[in-house]
Image: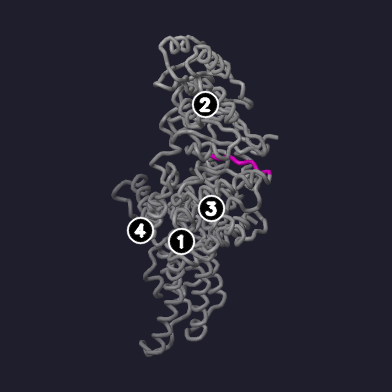
Amino acid sequence: MTAIEIQNLTKRFGTVTALDDLSFSVQEGEVFGFLGPNGAGKSTTINILLGFTRASAGSARVFGHDAETESKQIRFRTGALLEGYGVYSRLTAREHVERAANAKGVVADPDAILERVGIPEAADRRAGGFSKGMRQRMAIGMALVGEPDLLVLDEPSTGLDPNGVRDLREIIREESRRGATVFFSSHLIDQVEAVCDRVGILKDGEMVTEGDVDDLRARLDASVLTVSVDATPDSLLGSLRGIDGVEEVSATDKQVVVTARGGVTKLRALEQIERANVGFTDFTTTDPSLEEIFEEATLGALAAVDEAGPGPGEGSSGGGEDDPGGSDDDPDDGSDDPGNSDGSDSSDDDREADWSEATTEGDA
Amino acid sequence: MSLRTVVEDDLLRLRRSPLGWGVALSVLAPTAGIAAIVVLFELVDVTGGPAAPFDNIVMTVGVLLSFLLPFVAMLGSYSAIVYERESGSVRFLLGLPNSRLDAYAGKYVSRTVLLVVSLLAGCAVLGVVGFGLLTDPNATGLLLFVLVTVLFALVFVGFGIAISSVANSLIGATAGIIGTYVVFRGGWMIAQFAGLYVLRGGEEVAARPYPDWYYFLGRVNPINAYLTVLVDVLDRGPNTLARQILLTAPAPEVNTVATGTPYAVLALVGWVVVVPLVGFLLFRRKDLL
């Protein structure tokens, strides 16, 4: 069953194209990492999914419900932690959680939820005095209310200390084990890599690559083979460079380092070294990290692979659109929208303080 | 369920905010405050004569409210939605399963409750003082006064919420309510005279009687409509205090449908219905982030 299905989604803000014919899907029960550099269009995609923003073209469906016309049904089944949120400074943490439970029409135990996110002592304190990390933990708690079928987390580790990040990872794993689908949007690759089954990488409003992390590694496939030897004659290095699939060869006195695509290439390189009788003692291989995949995807190489055709790991629709264009000036992260900043919630406090002085309004 | 949640949450936050108390006090000042002044005057016995007529005092309160209530009602509602967008809390409001109608109607209801409860409390004090101390207390007049004042307040709560829902910033919404107040308080009259100038020419512009359209246009203004109804309900003659301080001539020299109370009530009801409706239709499909 498909949890999220996005087809040919386009969003324009005036002359700026934030999303350009975007298509991808997320299956139920998946933990999907939605990666992309700042301004790629990640938050715009989420804003359309949850009904904050209308698409210029295309469609977005969640559990079969149309994001534009059936948004409320979607949000009944969704727990959302959205980047750039602001808390109600005069409500306590308990009241925030109760508010989420009331809106969803479920019975929730605020104390248990706040305990789970690590701020049980703050239940009766007003959120206006919380640190960024406490606010983030409270917002995560609100997203968990009612055991949602879908968790949408947009830069969820913002403001969290290392313990908080670890707790967040554990919560995501628990929610995944419960059967929830998790849509994890971030530009922090290590956190996505730690929890996600599959990732999609967005750039300039287009999905440049999508698939299982292992499959993407296989597609990138430029792992590094390091071989320990007694000698590194030039003749050996020359013969290694002649193997099809070897991209780079370097050497020190006791090591040969081969950057190669594909397991067969690495095997041939090892055989070549052994035949050369240079005192082979050991070897290691290093797979590309998700960070390298991200760099390749957003800076060119993997996108070029996608344009050439889908790789072995590309299981879902829509990855690797080859339509050029898009924009690197996504209003999604624009500075003229104070509520939609680029990953930092640091402006919330300042803004609230400013307005409470400038008006009699406070948070009402 | 969601509508109720939005209303309850908003009222809770209003109760804890300076805005909520500021609006309540701004409504209590010209109602319960005037009642307190009446009590003071009677205790000191300033005039030495009989107590003031009930209708005169209530009319005076009405005239004061015709100045204050439009602004206070909009002040109490203009930030309801746009502030949530600016602060980011709209991500909670509409990230939870509240529809845009729930959010819009919920804010409208909560801000109306704030204003109406304050108004009823003030009028209750006024009623107690009026029936206890003033001459010729008039229960029907007071009841009609309360009803038309609530209707009048709803017009401007509607403007506040509608402006809040379509503005993209709190500053824009602030400009919106100030502009609305200026238009109804002074701009409307300028528009009427501009019409006379265009149709009659410069020399004839102020010649009496004014044409019917002048009153049709003028009494659509909710402030004028409110005063028209007050005069019908409470006016007791040309020498009353209310007559002396009213900006709108209570008894125009022409007799058209436009100068009657039904037209004024219809105008108020029209504003109450149309403004929030238009606001919601614009808000319904608006990009909020």
Q: Is residue B51 magenta?
A: no
What residue would you read off at disc 3?
A139
Q: Nearer the viewer, mark 2 or mark 4?
A: 2
Highlighted range, magenta:
A179-184
What residue would you read off at disc 2?
A284
Mark 4–mark 3 CB contact (< 8 Å): no
Q: Earlier in the sequence, mark 2 or mark 3?
A: 3
What residue would you read off at disc 1?
B76
Residue at figure coordinates x 55%, y 70% from the top left = B144
What residue would you read off at disc 4?
A358
Secondary structure state at the residue bearing disc 1: loop
Q: Amino acid at mark 3?
A: Ala
Q: Amino acid at mark 2?
A: Thr
Residue A193 in the image: above or below residue B273? above
Q: Amino acid at mark 4?
A: Ala
Q: Main secondary structure of the magenta part?
A: strand
Residue A139 in the image: above or below residue B240? above
